[in-house]
Image (cartoon, rainbow, N blue to C red):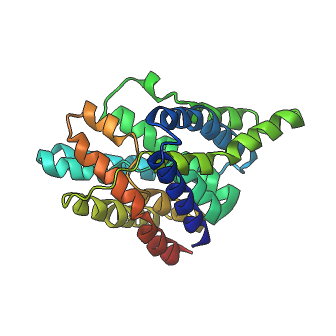
Amino acid sequence: MGSIITFLLLLALGYLLKSTGVLSKKDADTIRKLVFNVCLPCMAFQAMRSSTLDSTFILIAVVVVLLHVLGYLIFRFSNKSLGEIVFAGWAGNTAFMGYPIVESLLGPEGLSRAVVFDQANTIMIILLWLQKGIKSILSPPLLGAIFGILLKGVQIPVPFMDAVSMLAKATSPLAMIYTGCILILEWDHRVFPALLVKFVLLPVTAWVLSTLMGLPLIDYQVVVLQSSMPTMVVSTIYGEQLGLDTAFLSKTVVLSTLLYPLSFVLWSTLLM
């Protein structure tokens, strides 16, 4: 619980910095670019380079694929309003919040699995939901993870690795501050069913699939925790491409982030 309180304090700091004018919308966008293009790749690189590669990584990716196929089928055969709720529930913030929270609970081995989940999650959103080309999946965090695997066992100069480590450690505070900067507090009753999907239906489905596939303890812990993350920040951008209500998605991002401690307490208690 201590880690989530720390993250909430950083979230509040970001909101305060925005509210007092210390950080502008442009500043927040700069922080987002720094985290996505530099800090997250360093975190992914470090996690995959230091992890013990396990065959269950493939099973984690398979669970993610099955989750997205299920979600997309519901989305496609639903009316627009229900489809928006399903997309908001399935599009999880598995990088900006997922990486630091899983690492704080399960350590480096948990983080490496969180990276696998997140990258499979991103790939499925791009290829299945958005139906974009294969080139679109080559994001900086994915490249960081790939290089981390390729360079396992390779002797890398200490100053370089120290720099990577420092940038990786900056991910958590910067990601939380950025999330706080973009918060706009406004309730919408339509968000409630999306929160039920996000915090209950999807994690339960992930738990069932993980159990059926026989995933080891740490693997299904990561799968469920990542599935219970709040709605991803860029869901509004993706939603616009899908013709969805971006105002609704934006509110879901904000409220799911603010109410995430409820999900955290529930699932960390059940899983740990």
Which residue is at the far left? Answer: 79
The answer to whether 194 appears left or right of 57 in the picture is: left
Q: Quadrant of residue 144?
A: top right
- Vertical relation: 19 (above or below) 5: above
- Please state the horizontal and vertical placement of residue 5, each as a whole percent of the image: 56, 68
Q: Residue at x 46, y 71 (%)?
A: 267
- Please state the horizontal and vertical placement of residue 247, each as a whole percent of the image: 24, 44
Looking at the rendered image, the quarter that the C terminus falls into is: bottom right
- Please state the horizontal and vertical placement of residue 191, each as a whole percent of the image: 24, 58
User: 17 or 121, which lies in front?
Assistant: 17
- Please state the horizontal and vertical placement of residue 87, each as a whole percent of the image: 28, 47
Q: Residue at x 42, y 63 (%)?
A: 260
Count of marks overlaid on the render: 0
User: 194 or 9, which lies in front?
Assistant: 9
User: 184 or 155, which lies in front?
Assistant: 184
Q: Residue at x 53, y 42 (%)?
A: 22
Q: Residue at x 13, y 45 (%)?
A: 80
